[in-house]
Image (cartoon, coloured by chain):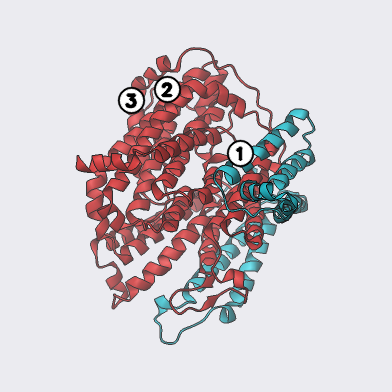
Chain colours: A cyan, B red
Amino acid sequence: MSDPHHEPHVFPLGRKPGELLFCAAFLIFAAAVLAMMSWQTSWLPSAGLAAQPRLWPALSLGGMALFGAILWARTFRTMRTPGRWQEAAQWMRSLEFVGWYVLYVLAIPVIGYLPATILFCVLLTLRLGYRSRLALISAFAFALFVVLTFKTAFNVKIPGGALYELAPEGLRYILIRYF
Amino acid sequence: MDLLLSSIDIIARWDVIAAIVVGSIGGVLVGSLPGVGAAVAIAIMLPATFMLEPIVGLTALLGVYGSSMFGGAIPAILVNTPGTPVNALTTYDGFPMTQRGEARRALALAYSASFFGGIFSIICLMLFAPILAKVAPMFGAREIFLAALLGIVLVVLNHRGQVLAAAMLACFGIFLQTIGLEGTGYTQRYTFGQGWLQNGIDLIVVVLGIFAISQALVLFLDKDKNFPMPTVGKKGFFKVMGELWVFRRLALVGSSFGVFCGMIPGVGEFMSQFMSYSYAQRTSKTPELFGKGNPEGLVASEAANNSVPPAAMVPLLALGIPGEELTAMMLAVFYVHNVIPGPQLFANEMDFILALYLCLIILNVLVVLFLFFATDTLMKVMLIPNRFLGMMILTFSLIGVYSLRNSLSDVFVASGFGVFGMILKRLDYPTSPVILGIVLGGLMEDKLRTAMARVQTPLDFIDRPIAFILFCMIVFALLLHGWTMWKARRGDTIDELHSDSRSEG
């Protein structure tokens, strides 16, 4: 019998960096949530099995744990590709952009949707390494387009900024309502 | 005839026409951008459509869904990078044709095959509609439960080489929909005493996290790609499109595969394309040229993938069962407007269904006309740097997440799912089972509870013909998979984890 690990193949036979780590984390999560079942779900003595509030959490978590365990075991047996912790570092790196996103959301009720969007787009463009005038103008124009389309034209429900309260009477309403 | 007039009356409004135009042109645009795709666009558009009437919102989403594959063929053919995952097979023969200097011919063939597939599928479904309207009321609670279960099973089994991961993630989706206050005994499930979890985890928040935010994060962590832009040539598309007549048999068979696969929940574009492509290769006089720029392969692939979206609307509209993530997102629009898809809708509001199909015909015509004149401009869209695109996606996604309830917890949940989705994408794990698990899990729980109240023994559950057929299909699908795995193990050729196509919708 030939060793499949040494045969040429169009798709890599080794597991991807970080795959085992993800499987292990998922399995631990499934096991932890499964262990909480007795106090996070109820069993109604008068109801039949299909009407039990616990049935579907039990089935789904059971499936997560079962398939997760088999997947972990299969992944464990597969040839390793080095770079697990570098990959985990990449996952952590993405949190920086999540931070930008959360800051953007937090800024909206304070400085308003239009200024927050312009700042977010232009600063993130700079952070991503685009320094050309074209890139910055594009980011600014895009931010303006988003606000004018969604808040001004479609009146999407996004709160006005506290900063707008400082504007003169007539302008204040327009800013809160449309920008 | 009355039915047709009534359907025309539904769509003969400026807002519906505007939705078709915006949806179809927007779909082509996002399709032609490698790294965006219809799922991201629909996820972003979804909350905005809640403000619109069902027909308007659905038309806009249908526009994106039905036209993104047209646009996806452009980068697949010109720069060997599929715009949407379902255009992957188009690269096999489309790009070698470009390398031979036949880019315009390849594009024209792809457009005409896609157009043929789309129109063929819609006509088939319009003809089937009266039959479906008769069959749909035969689906009771147990049949819908079994059809949803079949959908989940097929979605999982169709991720060849990733079945375990898909099953694990589908179960995760089912678990997510159980969180919150449940409707029968009014008990809490996994709320940990937190008020914001009482209403459960919003599907839209998860969708935006897993499809939009995750894609932005993936693009941020990647390097920008520079595509060498080929010369397309000046010859008119109209002249080249007539060549489809030479490949009419392949276009017809490919489209039929698309209709067939689209109607079965969980099967969809990938299976139809592979079936169509294999058929084309098997029956070709020059099978050795497949993958080296054979127009037959291009026609087979494009006709099959574009005939799926109209067909995929059948299980969604007739049974309320989405076959993949895009139709799952559309189901959310129905629920928001309190239009419950299912046998009743199909039986009583056939004019609404027909109106949707008419919209699809119009959008196919619009898209082809748009592509004739705008292909050269669309090629420039591909030059937008990837990470700049990520910034745009993140900005758009905020509108959906934050405008739902102005809730910071929604933003955190969406960001969490964004990171989760990003990890799945980087590991090439499928994301669609999570969404289908959420949608179909809730449906299965509800229907099983209703059905079990009316049966005495477990065997009664399958004593009706359609229930029995669906049950047999589930057993057959599982046995077939088991047999395939057993055969592969004996041959020692397939490693379940890493051997097969990691195609992902």
Q: Residue furthest front?
A: A169
Determine which quarter of the picture holds residue B408. Answer: bottom right
Pointer 2 local density, CA inside 10 Å: few below 14, some 14–19, many at least 20 = few
Element assignment for label 1: loop
Amino acid at circle 2: Thr
Front in this rendered view, residue B291 or B244? B244
Identify the mark at residue B50; answer none if there is no mark.
Answer: none
Whichever of labels 1 and 2 marks the residue nearer the N terminus, that label is: 1
Question: Which of labels 1 and 3 is toward the front?
Answer: 1
- Label 3: which residue? B248
Mark 3 and mark 2: span between their CA atoms? 17 Å
- Residue indicated by mark 1: B35
Q: Chain of mark 1?
A: B
- Image location of residue B458, percent across then percent down: 32, 74
Q: Residue at x 53, y 39 (%)?
A: B85
| Image height of B252 relative to B150, above or below | above
Q: How many neighbours does mark 1 have within 10 angstroms: few (below 14), some (14-19), or many (20 or more)?
A: many
